Image: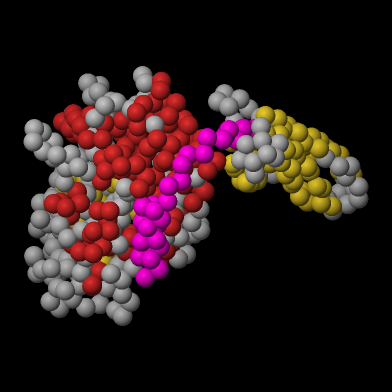
């Protein structure tokens, strides 16, 4: 579509990509800064309570940002009109890590050091999110966004969970991070065997000992990475080349008539992030701001331009977003003293000092995180105080699977199918699925303690009806397994009634 369509003062451009829960479009904010807009999938929003859960997830992200966490996509506002819901972000959602990993002709890929920095930053963010009792829910290369300065932020945090009505699952995030580490090992570290082994070891550590130990494994192996990688110069150069060759990949969704196009004055856009008497408005501090904030169809805020406390400032992670928490410069005489560089230089004990400094500088009006704020602060203190060295025990590995079925007697019965999973005695988690013939797969993830070489699982299979039929139960291990192998077994029984 042509440039000009706008949403709440954010002009949509010709660059878009599919996200996990909708379509991302690069936009230009009212002040001329580059931002992002996500149109949520209307079909997913039609589920009962989905919109309310999305509002809660976005509100939680804003509180995490106000508490000093900078690893999430900064949120400006969540607006709705005529059945469409748009998330307005404080920075573009391109390029994603998936786009950079796919690559483009003539654009050199980042190196293993760039991959390590991305993994450390995403692990740090997930640890803080989990400490607040939350989860991402859809972590993969497409929901990791790399900024112009090389910083990695997580986008769409909690939105997929909210739309599906599912509870937070840190274990799912952990497995997704391990998969991301293996993907970067096979991609950006393909020409660096030592770094690739480091990433594979971190992935295995994540599944057995958690994200904190996986992060520590990366930090302990910094000597295996290219010299000077902490400045992110290689990653920034790749992004610059990628942007220079960028062309629109698909036509972004048109905003509905309620949003209008530039210069039109029809309809309204209403923010979903504030209800009278329920917390702080994203437009707090603006003269006349009360109730749900309403913006004109041309997309301009109803509050005066330049007023403190607008939606743009509410989503910032610090007093001056670009100057203090987002800016990174390179060149002769410019020190590259980033948060990531401090983590790599000082190790596990130097993780969140800049974030705590921002907490001290934050106005009292913004210190309303409640339980979330306390959870994040607790995570910061723990991350700075604990020295949990990487446990170099042997990772969990499954070596064999065996399935047995009892004799089925009687009508309308429950058959107890038993499976035995044999391991190498390492500690970790084993994921598996039962595939009963004619039934839907049943997936499970069980913890396995160290020193235990067998793990018994069972399937309660309700069988009924008249007649005689032969039924088969198949047990398949999903992880951890060696690459290219398939571990499964099956057993059958005859039902007679």
**Percent from the top left, x then y, of residue 263?**
9, 58
Queried whether the magenta region covers residue 72, the answer comes back as no
Queried whether the magenta region covers residue 393, the answer comes back as yes
* Residue in view at x 10 percent, y 68 percent: 307
Q: Is residue 402 visible?
A: yes
Vertical side of 320 occupied by 438: above or below: above
Residue 144, image quadrant: top left
* Residue in view at x 42 percent, y 31 percent: 199
**Percent from the top left, x then y, of residue 374?**
38, 66
The answer to whether 388 appears left or right of 461 in the picture is left
**Percent from the top left, x then y, of residue 464?**
82, 51
The magenta-colored residue range is 370-398
Q: Viewer-proximal residue, 474 or 5? A: 474
* Residue in view at x 20 percent, y 72 percent: 284
| Quarter of the figure with the N terminus | top left
**Percent from the top left, x then y, of residue 312?**
18, 60
Q: Viewer-proximal residue, 298 or 199? A: 199
């Amino acid at each position: 579509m042509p440039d000009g369509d706008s949403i709440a003062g954010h002009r949509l451009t010709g660059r878009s990509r599919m996200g996990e829960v909708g379509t991302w479009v690069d936009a230009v904010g009212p002040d001329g800064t580059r931002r992002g807009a996500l149109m949520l999938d209307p079909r997913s929003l039609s589920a009962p309570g989905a919109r309310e859960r999305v509002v809660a997830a976005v509100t939680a992200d804003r509180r995490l940002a106000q508490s000093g966490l900078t690893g999430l996509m900064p949120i400006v506002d969540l607006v709705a009109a005529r059945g469409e819901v748009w998330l307005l972000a404080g920075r573009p959602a391109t390029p994603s890590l998936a786009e950079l990993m796919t690559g483009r002709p003539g654009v050199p890929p980042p190196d293993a050091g760039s991959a390590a920095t991305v993994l450390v930053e995403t692990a740090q963010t997930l640890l803080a999110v989990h400490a607040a009792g939350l989860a991402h829910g859809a972590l993969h290369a497409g929901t990791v966004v790399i900024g112009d300065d090389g910083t990695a932020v997580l986008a769409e945090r909690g939105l997929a969970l909210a739309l599906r009505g599912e509870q937070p699952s840190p274990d799912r995030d952990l497995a997704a991070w391990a998969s991301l580490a293996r993907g970067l090992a096979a991609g950006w570290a393909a020409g660096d065997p030592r770094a690739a082994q480091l990433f594979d070891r971190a992935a295995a550590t994540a599944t057995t000992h958690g994200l904190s130990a996986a992060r520590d494994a990366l930090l302990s192996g910094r000597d295996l990475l290219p010299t000077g990688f902490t400045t992110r110069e290689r990653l920034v150069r790749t992004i610059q080349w990628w942007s220079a060759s960028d062309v629109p990949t698909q036509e972004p969704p048109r905003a509905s008539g309620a949003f209008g196009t530039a210069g039109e004055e029809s309809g309204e856009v209403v923010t979903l992030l504030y209800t009278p008497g329920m917390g702080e408005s994203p437009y707090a501090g603006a003269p006349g701001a009360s109730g749900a904030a309403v913006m004109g169809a041309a997309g301009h805020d109803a509050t005066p331009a330049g007023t403190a406390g607008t939606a743009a400032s509410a989503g910032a992670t610090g007093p001056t977003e670009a100057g203090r928490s987002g800016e990174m410069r390179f060149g002769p005489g410019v020190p590259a003293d980033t948060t990531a560089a401090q983590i790599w230089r000082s190790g596990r004990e130097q993780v969140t000092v800049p974030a705590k400094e921002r907490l001290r500088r934050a106005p009292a009006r913004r210190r309303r995180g409640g339980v979330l704020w306390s959870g994040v602060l607790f995570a910061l203190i723990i991350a700075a105080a604990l020295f949990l060295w990487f446990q170099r025990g042997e990772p969990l590995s499954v070596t064999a699977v065996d399935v047995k079925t009892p004799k089925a007697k009687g009508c309308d019965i429950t058959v107890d199918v038993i499976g035995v999973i044999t391991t190498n005695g390492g500690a970790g988690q084993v994921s598996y699925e039962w595939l009963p013939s004619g039934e839907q797969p049943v997936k499970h993830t069980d913890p396995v303690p160290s020193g235990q070489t067998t793990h018994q699982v069972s399937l309660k299979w309700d069988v009924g009806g008249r007649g005689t039929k032969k039924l088969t139960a198949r047990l398949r291990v999903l992880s951890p397994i060696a690459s290219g192998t398939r571990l499964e077994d099956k057993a059958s029984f005859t039902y007679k009634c």
